[in-house]
Image (cartoon, rainbow, N blue to C red):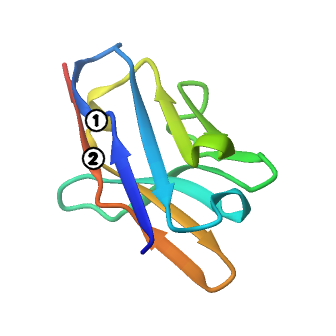
Amino acid sequence: QVQLVESGGGLVQAGGSLRLSCAASGIRFSIYAVGWYRQAPGKQRDLVASITSAGSTYYADSVKGRFTISRDNAKNTVYLQMDSLKPEDTAVYYCNAHVAMYNYWGQGTQVTVSS
């Protein structure tokens, strides 16, 4: 059974930091590209950052320079370090792993940034 489990969300003041984790089980995690998405109430789910199996990274312009995505294949985990958080970063953050026709989502973790 494939599972992606996000953790690390919470409430933080503007300017603060959080580190999200996405732990995978049931898949050969190292071959998957992994993305972090977020969805605010009433808005679409958008890609925030992604990392390929080779370690290449992508960041949305809105988080570039503030967020860092990384992966530890030995732990089957991808991280999203979020610094200098802003109220507009408030959303549910989802982890996605995909390769070829395989595509998996986690259940999401809430991040709330207070002003």
Q: What residue sits 26% from the left and 29% below the top?
A: 87
Q: What residue sits 50% from the left and 36% below the top?
A: 80
Which x, y percent locates residue 35?
55, 55
Residue 18 is drawn in which quadrant? top left
Crowd around label 2: few <14 · some 14–19 · many ≥20 (10 Å): many
Where residue 109 is drawn, which disc sits there? Answer: 2
In this rendered view, identify the residue nearer to me: 18 or 75. Answer: 75
Q: Are marks 1 and 2 in contact (CB under 8 Å)?
A: yes
Of marks 1 and 2, which one's residue comes earlier in the chain? Answer: 1
Up-down relation of residue 70 to residue 35 (above or below): above
Q: Quadrant of the C terminus?
A: top left
In this rendered view, identify the residue nearer to me: 4 or 60. Answer: 4
Q: Is residue 109 left or right of residue 11?
A: right
Residue 77 is drawn in which quadrant? top right
Question: Amino acid type of disc 2?
Answer: Thr
User: Which SS class for mark 2?
Assistant: strand
User: Which SS class for mark 1?
Assistant: loop
Mark 1 = which residue? 9
Which x, y percent locates residue 64?
59, 33
Q: Quadrant of the N terminus?
A: bottom left
